Amino acid sequence: MASPAEAPAPRGNVVLLVVLSLVAFGFAKLPWLVRGLDAATYLGRNGGFLATVPLALWVAYARATPAGARALVVVLSAGLLLHANLALHRPGDANVLALMHLPILQWTLVALAFLGDGWRERGRRVEFVRFGTELVIFTLLLTGGGVILTGLTLWLIHMVGTHLGEWYLKNVVPWGLVAAPLVAAYIDSRRRGQASRLGPRVAAAFQPLLLLTLAPFVGLVLYRGAAAYQQREFLSAVNAVVVTVAWAILATLCEGGRSPRRTVIDALTLALVAVTVALDGVALWAIVAASGASAGGPAGSPCSAPTWPSSVAWRACAGDSSASSGGAARSPPSRHGSPPTFPCSRSGAGSSF
């Protein structure tokens, strides 16, 4: 009897694929069908569900996942949907961070549907990493082909003089986007018995490119110091780099065996890990430096060495209202009648009161 990893896709997969993609497309169009529903907010909270929930349901059916695991996928999907739309609607950094990490839980739904009761088995987990890597590759290939097909279709529509271009962009393109992961999973399921190594080989091919890209960047970061990289954008970029490198390493390690080529890949993997750890260390260094600055001004910053007048400038940097209103601490006007400028603005150009 074939193992679940090698079993062919059951009958009815294509019908289920089309049905799930149409349901996901219907939910994606809700902001344009329901008045008062902001499209950016709705898609920001639910965009990941439009891809992962149909994919998890299709994978659970295609791999004949046990009924208990299927029920758990449905319950967790409903719980995450309610949490994202009811508990994370208030503005705030905590909710923003929760929404940023929500795709991890969404991908866990796919993992649960794929692994079922065999999540303790090492072979199943390795197979899931291969599945995820090839799913991303096939999805990108399908999306790229869809872009080319869309351009050709719009050109033909323009040539014949019809006005279907806007309808095509508003309906066919979104349906294709939500259907691409499902089609990629279907393609992977049909090749599952062929011992595919596409994912590990593509990841191994990108490892030298990642190393050549990251090594000079880490050197430049270490040369300039952490103080220049305290912006949130830099820290977000580091997170993206760490996730990308971790996925490439996991995909590469899934290809077992020993050979001279494998020894070179292992050396590249070790170097890539070292560079990524160094970059992550710089990011942690920047976070510590930023925390020290917010706590009272780090040594060497403009707030630690105010220029004029010393006591008033420091209290203004610390946010003391008495530094700018009333009493002996009132700031005198400048020579030209404008308020004095202190060297503590966030932009580095000084701040005036």
Image: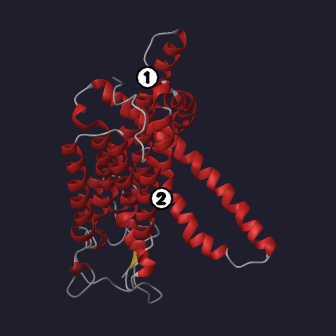
- Residue 62 rendering spot, x and y as whole percentages: 37, 42
- Mark 2 vs mark 1, foreground winner is 2
**66 relative to 207, above or below:** below
**Horizontal relation, residue 168 to residue 352: left or right:** right
Q: Secondary structure at mark 1?
A: helix
Amino acid, disc 1 = Leu
Q: Secondary structure at mark 2?
A: helix
Closest to the observer: 86 or 322? 86
Residue at the front extreme?
Answer: 11
Residue at the right extreme?
Answer: 159
Residue in the picture at 42% in, 17% down? 256
- Residue 279 rendering spot, x and y as whole percentages: 42, 38
For label 2, the residue is 178
For label 1, the residue is 270
**243 relative to 167, above or below:** above
Amino acid, disc 2 = Val
Q: Is residue 290 in sight in this rendering?
A: yes
